[in-house]
Image (cartoon, rainbow, N blue to C red):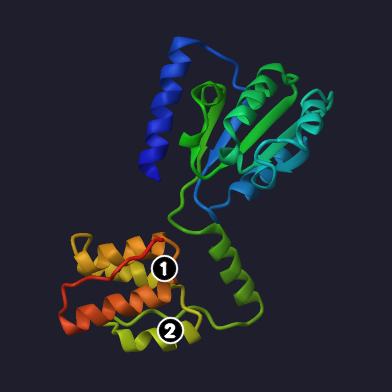
Amino acid sequence: MNCGIASVEQMFERETKAKPAPKAALLVCGEPGCGKSAWIKAQAKQKGAELFHWNIRVDRSLREGREILHTQVRARQPMYVWLEGADDLTQEAQAFLRRILETASPNIMCALEVREPWKLSPPILSRCTIVNLPSHTSFRRQKNLEMAKTLGIPGEKPLKENLTWKDISSLRKDAVDPMLILQQCIDKYGWSNVNLQNCIRAIGAGKTPWIQLALFLHYQDSGSTVGVRVNTE
């Protein structure tokens, strides 16, 4: 993710040097749950502006939203036009978005919420101010922990140091975050561990992390170097 953000920032810098353009939009980048939506809402509230929201992830071609967006960006009152999932736009829809950014009223600020900013075209990136939200701590997870504390639900217990595959079942019943287990495995065994690499690939391919972690720990306990078989079909 950080590598992708860096390449986008370099592209943004080249486009800006080549042809200065007004910053008609904010490019709010970050992983799921890092607080992008909350940040945009807070910005609109701080500026005393209205907030209009459109979910691109259910309208990738903007077939339903074009006329609505065209009207909103010409509003007279201060407004934040929040486009959730702008990185899912089709190429043709991105061309329309570029025209929106070029012709929007001065009192309109478009906020493009994205997870993978490199999917957007350079002309769009050059018209955006990049806001990269850190993802070291999940905003959604933090809010859930605060809610659990308010309701009197016991908090997370620290993981024991030497986990085995037999521990996975009880950890799952205790609602432990499997990503915490994965991070512990990374810290303990390192990225060069072949079994761990295959485990991460399988999770990235959509396999359940609980099963993949159990398989990984089983291989480690047995001393096997075969690795976790990954079927991405």
Viewer can see residue 174: yes
> Which callout, 1 or 2, points at the residue further toward the start of the chain?
2
Q: How many residues crowd around disc 2 within 10 Å: few (fewer than 14), some, or many (20 or more)?
A: some
Regarding mark 1 in the picture, which secondary structure is present there?
helix
Regarding mark 2 in the picture, which secondary structure is present there?
helix
Contact flag, marks 1 and 2 (Cβ < 8 Å) = no
Look at 40% across and 59% down and name the residue there: 204
Apparent side of residue 150 relative to residue 136 in the rendered image (left or right): right
Apparent side of residue 80 relative to residue 225 in the rendered image (left or right): right
Quarter residue 136 falls in: bottom left
Disc 1 residue type (three-letter): Met
Q: Is residue 48 above or below residue 161?
A: above
Quarter residue 188 falls in: bottom left
Res 179 label: 1
Disc 2 residue type (three-letter): Leu
Res 171 label: 2
Near-viewer residue (33 or 150): 33
- C-alpha span from label 1 to label 2: 12 Å
Look at 55% across and 56% down and name the residue there: 33
- Percent position (x, y) of residue 98? 63, 22
Near-viewer residue (233 or 9): 233
Near-viewer residue (226 or 175): 226
Viewer can see residue 43: no
Res 162 label: none
- Percent position (x, y) of residue 92? 62, 28
- Percent position (x, y) of residue 189? 21, 68
Look at 28% across and 84% down and name the residue there: 164
Look at 75% across and 20% down and name the residue there: 105
Quarter residue 97 falls in: top right
- Location of the C terminus by quadrant is bottom left
- Percent position (x, y) of residue 215? 31, 78
Residue furthest toward the front?
233
